[in-house]
Structure formats: structure tokens, C-alpha cells
Image (spheres, rainbow, N blue to C red):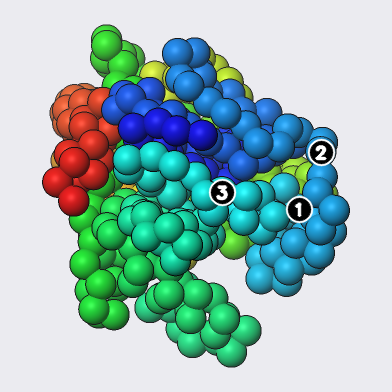
Amino acid sequence: MTSDTLIVTRLMWPGGVFRAALEESRHMPAKLIVLRRSNHDTPYDMNGVDIEVIRDNGKRGFFTPIFEILTLFYDKERGRDATIDLDLIFQMRDIEGEKILYMDQFVALAGLLNLLLHGKQYYVFLHETVLGRQFNVKNLPLIIYDKLILKHAKMVITNSKWNQRILASYGMKSTVAHLGCNPTEKLNLVREPLIITVSMWDRFRRPEIYVELAKRINAKVLIVGNWTRDDYKDEFIEKFGSVVKVTGPLNEDELGKLYDQASFYIRFGYGERGPGLGGIEALGHGLPVITNKGLGISELIDDGKNGFIVDDIEEAASKINSVLSDKNRHLDMIKNAWEKGKELSWENHAAKVRNILNCN
């Protein structure tokens, strides 16, 4: 299997890691290798991208049950679909390409093996890491693993300055390439009293806080996107469905229309150094973003201009109610958000990644 530039990712599913891999492959361009297609529908446009999927949806390896148990031990909220398929990763140990970019440190195990076996350098795009988090004995193997993989990489690219600072504290250099979006060509200035939040939902992302938001504002709140576990989604809807609307997964056209209609995008993070891709997509549609300092997108928000950085839901509600009663200020924020979104296009993101690979 040969190509000048290869991008390797573990999973085809509706999340930021796969979306980044897809758009980098489209715009660089590069061949995209996906180890496994998940059970979640993936709503992104894949036309014109050279994609090879190693294991299709519904197929399992002999050791898959063991890998599922190991993955769930460390992160049960992500569900079985997020299983780390070590058998497929080992298959990639002899992969050939002038430059090979692995889209997380787990699939980059193939890069380390390739380095040890064949002397082939590898590159890692780091989205999240246990490094720098509060110590937990359970996570000690992951800490050792992340250090091993990242220190031997030719170059680490990461999605936030937050991650970059953490890596620097461990003596590792990295370069930041913020994730991207497809900015709308025409900005909609007529908005509805609608607040949306988008994610791959699990308990760690605390969707219940947006219920509290809905009780405090003069607008409707929509919780949009896939859920890692259907039982949790059903439980949430039963408990809070009368206060907020849960849409479930939407295709790109449907989501784009929501971004164009809404007045604000909100998403809080709790130690998530990644941006939360929905916030960048929102900016691309001129949708001001409200977040806290616990989410990586706070690096991209100019407080009071293209969104707000707040401490809690009460402050977020106050900001929303204030701006919705001031049309001119809201319009200024919409225009500023769109300008930032245009800076963060996938084309610009891919060009930066391409330049990083070419210079190292």
C-alpha cells in the first residue's frame, strides 16, 4: 500500500477526529485509511476523497471482544463503537508512504512499530491526551503510553494551544493547527430565538446543564448530535424532554440550516482541550459561540465580539438575554463570528497541516 502522503484514522463516525482526517485528505490531498467503519451513520460528504476502509460495519475480528473490554474499562461512556482495534493497528505496521499522519496516539502505535521495524518516521495529530490531567492510578498505563508514542514521533500536530502547553511541560515540541469548518457563502442576519449545542453526547459532556439554561432564557434550546449510548439518550429525553428538544443526529444540510437560524451556539467543556468541532462550524455560519475555559474553543473566542467566555450557566443566560434584547449588538457579533469562521476554513487548516509535514 503506497502513497506520497497517507492519513490514518481509527474510526469512521460522526466525530471531530474523523471529520478532520476527511477534510485534510480532501484538501491536501492525501489518501485516507480508516481502520473501521462504526455503527453510527457518518453524515459528511466523502465525494472525491480517496478512502480505504479496512474493516466494514458489522464485521469483527477474533480478538474484538477482548479489545472491547479493555476500551470500556478506560472509557465506558464512549460505548463499544469506540473500541481500539489493536489487531487492525498491528496490520498497519508495514504501511508505506512518504509522510504518514496518524490521527490519534492509539493508531500511531502502527507508526512506532513501523519506526522500530523499518526506520520510518511518523507524525501524530493529537486531539486529547491524559498527560497533564489529575493523576489516577488507573490511567498510569495510558500516561506511559502517550509519552512513548508522542516522544518518538517526528512531529506532533495538535488542535489547541492548551495541548501544546501540556506537551511542552513534558519536554515535547508540537505545532498547533486549529480544526476547521466550511464557512457559509452568504451570511443570514435574520435569526430566531434559538440556542443550539452540538456534540457526540455522553455523561462526561453533561447535557443536563443546558436544561438549566433553558429555564433561564427567553429562547428555545436544542441539543443536537449523536449519543454514544442510546440508553443514556432515552433516559435523558424521558427526564428532560419537556424542557429542551433533543434532535439526535442531523445531516450536514439540516445542521447548516440550524446554524443559520439560531441566535447563539453554546457548549461547555470539562477539561476538554479540543475545540468541540460544532463551535467552529457555528462560527462559519456567523453564529456567536458561548463557552467556558474548560473547552479548547475558548482560544478562538474574542470575548464580547464573536461570542462569550463565561464561568457558568447563570452568566451564559444573562449574556444571552442581554444580547437578544439588543439587535444591533447581536448583528455585530454575528458578523464577527462569520469573519472568524472564514479564517478557520478546512482549506486553511489542511494547508497548514500540509506545510507542517513538508517542513519536517
Q: Residue furthest front?
A: 118
Please say if the residues under marks 3 and 2 sit with CB atoms less than 8 Å apart.
no
Residue in the image at 21% along x and 26% along y: 342
Crowding at mark 3 (Cα within 10 Å: few <14, some 14-19, many 20+): many
Q: CA distance from mark 1 to mark 3?
A: 22 Å
Residue underneath mark 1? 80
Q: Is residue 218 left or right of residue 55?
A: left
Q: Is residue 301 left or right of residue 282?
A: left
Crowding at mark 1 (Cα within 10 Å: few <14, some 14-19, many 20+): many
Indicate which disc, 1 or 3, sits on the residue closer to the N terminus: 1
Please say if the residues under marks 2 and 1 sit with CB atoms less than 8 Å apart.
no
Q: Amino acid at mark 2?
A: Lys
Which of the two discs, 2 and 1, sits closer to the camera?
2
In this rendering, does residue 300 appear at all? no
Q: Amino acid at mark 1?
A: Arg
Relative to 312, does residue 353 appear above or below in the rendering? above
Secondary structure, mark 1, is helix
Find residue 326 and report its horizontal and vertical position in percent. Answer: 23, 31
Indicate which disc, 2 or 1, sits on the residue closer to the N terminus: 2
Q: Check residue 59 in the rendering and tell me which mark sits there, or answer none.
A: 2
Relative to 50, does residue 245 appear above or below in the rendering? below
Residue in the image at 28% along x and 59% along y: 154
Secondary structure, mark 3, is helix
Find residue 185 and report its horizontal and vertical position in percent. Answer: 27, 11
Residue underneath mark 3? 92
User: Which image quarter: residue 242?
Assistant: top right
